[in-house]
Amino acid sequence: MKILVVGSVAYDAVETPAGKRESQLGGAATYFSVSASYFTEVGMIGVVGDDFDPADIAMLQSHDIDTSGLVKADGKTFRWSGEYMEDINTAVTLDTQLNVFGEFEPELNDAHANAPYLFLANIDPNLQLKVLDSMAKRPKMVANDTMNLWIDIAKPVLTDLISKVDTLLINEEEAKQLTGEDHLPDAAKAIIKLGPNSTVIKRGEYGATLFGENFSFAAPAYPLERVVDPTGAGDSFAGGFMGYLASVDKVDEESLRTAAIVGSTMASFAVEDFGLDRIKNLTKSDIDERFKAFVDLTRFNPLT
Ligand code: AMP
């Protein structure tokens, strides 16, 4: 197993200008795993309730995702309900029900604990920290994501966690909320001061900016004519980003730059349909073609 991920596995109720879904498979770890599965071997740590559809496990397994760490508990699967009616780039949370995640104690087997890449997808930072602490040794690379809820209610433990990771992936608004800085480069600097040596600040349809200690890199979002459902764009970005790094097994400036474009490539698919409907059905050539379109989108000649 190259990447281990912990994070939410959910049923989401989502409303966007393109329509409404009452209960669709979602969750940060789900989008991440499916996206990363196109590049490398992924294992998930998480919990689902007794309402979880076996067809959803089968879909994950059809992507060769190791679901041995996805336990089934009595109760309901995590539920999130949100809408994107005012602004397609910003999810407004209507309701969050932790359900089985409220009591979850992660247990890692040997393969999980020895994974060289670890992604702590969005979930309670106490749980993210427990998984990091359960690793057999410090993975080669650890990255995490979070959201406003955890900044609001669990900032001290979240800050402790961030001090231990290599890369924080976070939305622009949340980066500003976390650091108290209004200006993007200042927020990135403040994040790097907390401990990570790079951070990816995600800006919805305006793309994402990767900041390292001595460089920054702008990855655009693909200019799609129609965004159907932005849910999972961030996690799909992270899946492409980490999936690529794990597949080349290298974390340096050049590979981080390419990883950011692979992340944008995967995010662009995620938003083309509701839930995982598009991203779960990709071919290698879909991904190669879209990646090439990014090369074209950002190609320019030096000034002479
Ligand atoms: P994003 O990639 O940021 O659009 O993440 C979307 C996913 O995050 C949804 O499928 C939700 O189930 C999940 N989610 C929403 N709120 C939370 C939360 N508080 N903790 C963990 N996961 C969440």
Image: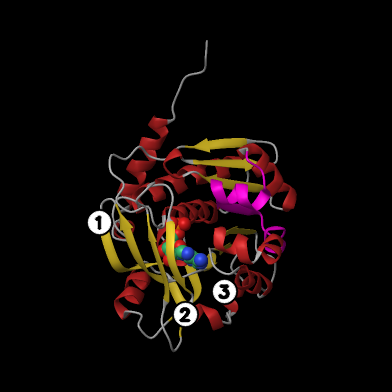
Distance from the alpha carbon under mark 3 to that under mark 2? 24 Å
Q: Position of residue 220 (x, y in %)?
A: 45, 37
Q: Position of residue 204 (x, y in %)?
A: 44, 45
How dense is the environment of label 3, judged by Cα within 10 Å: few (below 14), some, or many (20 and up)? many
**Magenta segment:** 160-182
Question: In this view of the protein, which residue sits in the foreground, 268 or 142?
Answer: 268
Write down the residue under mark 3. Answer: 112
Query: What amino acid does circle 2 point to?
Result: Asn
Q: Earlier in the sequence, mark 3 or mark 1?
A: 1
Write down the residue under mark 1. Answer: 19
Q: Establish if 208 lies above or below 163.
A: above
Query: What amino acid does circle 1 point to?
Result: Gly
Q: Establish if 173 lies above or below 33.
A: above
Query: What amino acid does circle 3 point to?
Result: His
**Element on which disc 2 rests:** helix
Q: Position of residue 167 (x, y in %)?
A: 62, 53
Residue located at (37% from left, 37% from top): 292
Residue located at (55% from left, 83% from top): 103
Examine the image and state in which quarter residue 282 appears: bottom left
Examine the image and state in which quarter residue 20 appears: bottom left
Write down the residue under mark 2. Answer: 99
